[in-house]
Structure formats: structure tokens, C-alpha cells
Amino acid sequence: WILSRRIIGSLICIDREDSSKMLKTIAALVVAGTFVCVEAFTAPSLAVRSGSPAHASAITGHKLSLRRNAASIVTTKMALETVELKNGKASATVYPLGATVTSFKAPHEVLFCRPDAKFDGSKPISGGIPHCFPQFGPGAIQQHGFARNLVWKVASKSDQDITLELVDNEETMAMWPNKFQALYKVTLADSKLNCELTVKNTDDKAWEFQAALHTYFHVNNIDKCEVQGAFKGAPHLNRMANPATTTPESRGAIRFDAEVDSCYEGVSGKVVLVDEVKPEETVTINNLKGWEDTVLWSPYGNEGMGYKNFACVESVKAVKPQKLAPGESWTSSVDIIPGKA
């Protein structure tokens, strides 16, 4: 390995002892296969984090803090662990990174991963079923929170199910100073996928959070599909309007003919994504408990994201954040069912 002049030159401005420590750390990271940008030692930020502190956060006096809208500065490229679930003709793939389900086949593929998705740990996975927690969308901390950036612990697994766990650590506390436990159980049946998220307050004070499953569903043509549900009359927050506005929805079914970023307050229960090209690839999202709102998202026209072949139909608890007292828990559950159930 070779340390660049840029890195060495950047250390001139700090004292000799700290410079020596950082040089040793940089060398260790390079040997370990970690790609290091010198700004990581001068500009705090969040990249993809492990549930345990990342290598860079061990640098004395130069801990990375998790800041709002932070850019990815330190990037670790690695082969990511996956877990395969099987049940008859159905299968699912789960990544502990972000506790992300990236594939559900029963037998056709129900989910979608964008062509620009990264599977090397350099960023959250763009596709499948990413988590948004403890924040949905923009806000006091980074977009959609930190759960999708973290490697969750595999708490238990069998051929048909897996439970992953995420708890607070030094880095999450720096961003969101609340103690918690999140358990995410994915269960594969022969004809459906169930996703159950339980969030527990393990702190000695109450706190609030938002959560969502930002699910990408495969469609054969975005111009030939629609989302059916209890949309008519529901409060519709249109984030594509300038300024964003909330008005009653006049439609009973929603189609995609432009960029869409819409939150429907109180729309839950059964929501159906109808594929008009292949009706047998229609999918039902059956929100059983916890999820209270539905968000629809499409980057319509963005070829790089593969917009033509997916629609996001998201199960959300965001309009009214959930408050938990010490020791209290909140549980959500959704069935993803191929076909119109």
C-alpha cells in the first residue's frame, strides 16, 4: 500500500502525536481493504455503519458523529452476508445490512432492486424492502433515519424465517439519544411474506419515532399499473407540489404518469398494486397492524433508477409519530401476497 501525499500533507496541521496515531490507523484501514478519504478525519459524517462501531470511529479524538444529511465519507467495500429462506416454491433473500429483504419469489419475483443499487456495503441497498427508522423522510436527523445504514444482528433463523435485532450504540446515540431495541421478523410462507417489526423503549424516558417499510415492487410497465385502496377522500400530502400541499384525494385508484411522492394519511389495510401487463403479477399489501399510512413513490422518468419497472408502495407510521414510555413496545405487521387477495 501507499499513503498519498494528500493524506500526509493533511496531517501537518495537527500535532505530531495525533498525526502518528492517525497514520497508523490509516495504514491499518488500507491493509484491511478499507478505502479511506482524508476528509473522514476532519469532517464528521455517516456512511454505512455496523451495529457495532465502525473502524474509523476508534480513532481517538476523531470520532465520527452522525449528522443531519451527512455525506458518505468513509466507505468500506465488502462482501455482504445474505440469508436465504425457502418454503416450497417460494424463496426470499435477506441482507443483515439494513435488515433488507431484496428478493421474494412465489414463484415470480415480487420485489425490485434498482440498477444503481450497491451490494458492497458502500451505501444502503436501493431496492427490496428497506427500513426507515427512527425517522421517515427529512427531519432532525439524516433522511429516513439510520436503520437502513446499519448491520443488524441475526438473532435467530430457520429455513422459513429470520429475526434480526438492532439496538442503540454509541453512534446511534450521537445522532438520536434514545435507547431502543428493534426486532424484525421475516416469515416466508408458500404463498406470502410476512414482515413484523417490534420497537421497544429500553430507556428511562419516553420518546417518539417514525417508521416505514420503503418497499419497491416490480411492475412490468409503470405506465400500465395502478394502486387500489381506500384513497378517495383521504388526506393527501403531495410532496411534488411547490409548496407541498395536503388536500383530499379525489381518486379511488392512483396511477403513475409523472414523478410521485405522496403520503396518504390513514390509508392502511389492504392496498393492491395491479399489474395490467401481467395481471397474475398483481400484488396485495395487507397491513395487519401498526402501519397507519401509505406512501407512494416513483422517480418517473429516471432511467438510471430503472423507473419503468417498479413502484414503491410503502407501509408507514409517520403522520402521527409513535410515542413509547419506558418499557413499552410497538409492533407492526404486513403480509405481502402475490395476486389480488
Image (cartoon, helix red, strand yellow):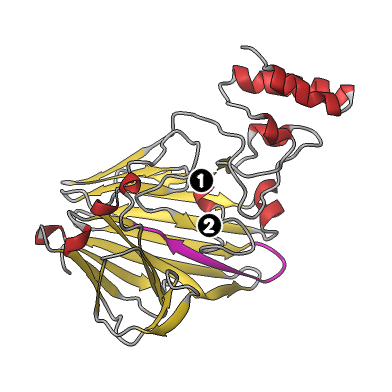
**Residue assigned mark 1:** 152
Toward which corner of the image does residue 3 lie, by quadrant? top right
Q: Is residue 185 left or right of residue 190?
A: right
Q: Is residue 323 magenta?
A: no
67 and 285: which one is in front?
67
Toward which corner of the image does residue 192 lie, by quadrant? bottom left
Secondary element at tag 2: strand
Placement of the C terminus among the 4 image quadrants? bottom left
Residue 53 is situated, as x and y percent measured from the top left of the image, at 65, 39
Res 100 label: none
- Identify the mark nearer the N-term, 2 or 1: 1
Q: Are marks 2 and 1 in contact (CB under 8 Å)?
A: yes
| Residue 34 appears in the picture as rendered | yes
Q: Is residue 145 above or below residue 263?
A: above
Q: Is residue 289 left or right of residue 4?
A: left
Dot 2 amino acid type? Ala
Q: Name the residue located 35 percent from the left edge and 76 percent from the top edge.
A: 268
Q: Is residue 158 above or below residue 206?
A: above
Residue at far top of view: 1
Secondary element at tag 1: loop
Q: Name the residue located 58 percent from the left edge and 43 percent from the top edge.
A: 51
Placement of the N terminus among the 4 image quadrants? top right
Residue 41 is situated, as x and y percent measured from the top left of the image, at 73, 34
**Residue assigned mark 2:** 182
Dot 1 amino acid type? Trp
| First to last magenta residue range | 202-215
Residue 29 is situated, as x and y percent measured from the top left of the image, at 64, 23
Q: Is residue 205 magenta?
A: yes
